[in-house]
Amino acid sequence: MSASNHLYILWTNGDPVTSDKMVFMYGINALKKGWWEKVTIIVWGAPAVLATENESIQGKIKAARKAGVYLTACKACADQLGVSSQLGDLGIDVQYTGQLLTDILKGDEKLLTI
């Protein structure tokens, strides 16, 4: 698959409405409607806590995973916020993401930052 068919969504906004009505609405529909072949949501910062505390957002995470969206979280952020294991329990791949983000920015990748 070419990079142009893979969308990365950098989710840094901890607002539940923005998370629901942008990150997950677009991320899920992008796959269901064939707008993108692959969608990755990168959880970075405040959304790591939101994901562990908000049941509605947890439902969106489950729906996104079911639709085929890959979710990963910044391990440094999650560790500092004390939520790494909870994110893992939600099916989110917790890993160091600094190099991933750098590669996306330096490469021919598509990045949407929310």
Image: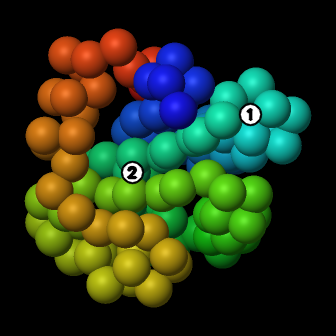
Q: Quadrant of residue 13?
A: top left
Residue 65, given in percent of the width and then of the height, sits at 65, 64
Q: Nearer the viewer, mark 2 or mark 1?
A: 1
Q: Quadrant of residue 10?
A: top left
Mark 2 surroundings: few (<14), some (14-19) or many (≥20) residues within 10 A: many
Q: In the depicted view, which residue is nearer to us: 72 or 20?
A: 72
Give the residue at mark 1: 30
Residue in the picture at 24% in, 55% down:
74
| Label at residue 43 | 2
Which kind of residue does numbered mark 1 sit on? Answer: Ala
95 left or right of 28? left
Mark 1 surroundings: few (<14), some (14-19) or many (≥20) residues within 10 A: some
Q: In the depicted view, which residue is nearer to us: 105 or 6?
A: 6
Which kind of residue does numbered mark 2 sit on? Answer: Val
Against 90, residue 48 (above or below) is above
Could you tell me which secondary element the residue under label 2 belongs to? Answer: strand
How many badges with numbers are in the image? 2
Residue in the picture at 28% in, 26% down:
104
Residue 41, given in percent of the width and then of the height, sits at 49, 46
Could you tell me which secondary element the residue under label 1 belongs to? Answer: helix
Work out which residue is located at the far right of the displayed protein and give it. Answer: 33
Measured Cα–Cα span from mark 2 to mark 1:
18 Å
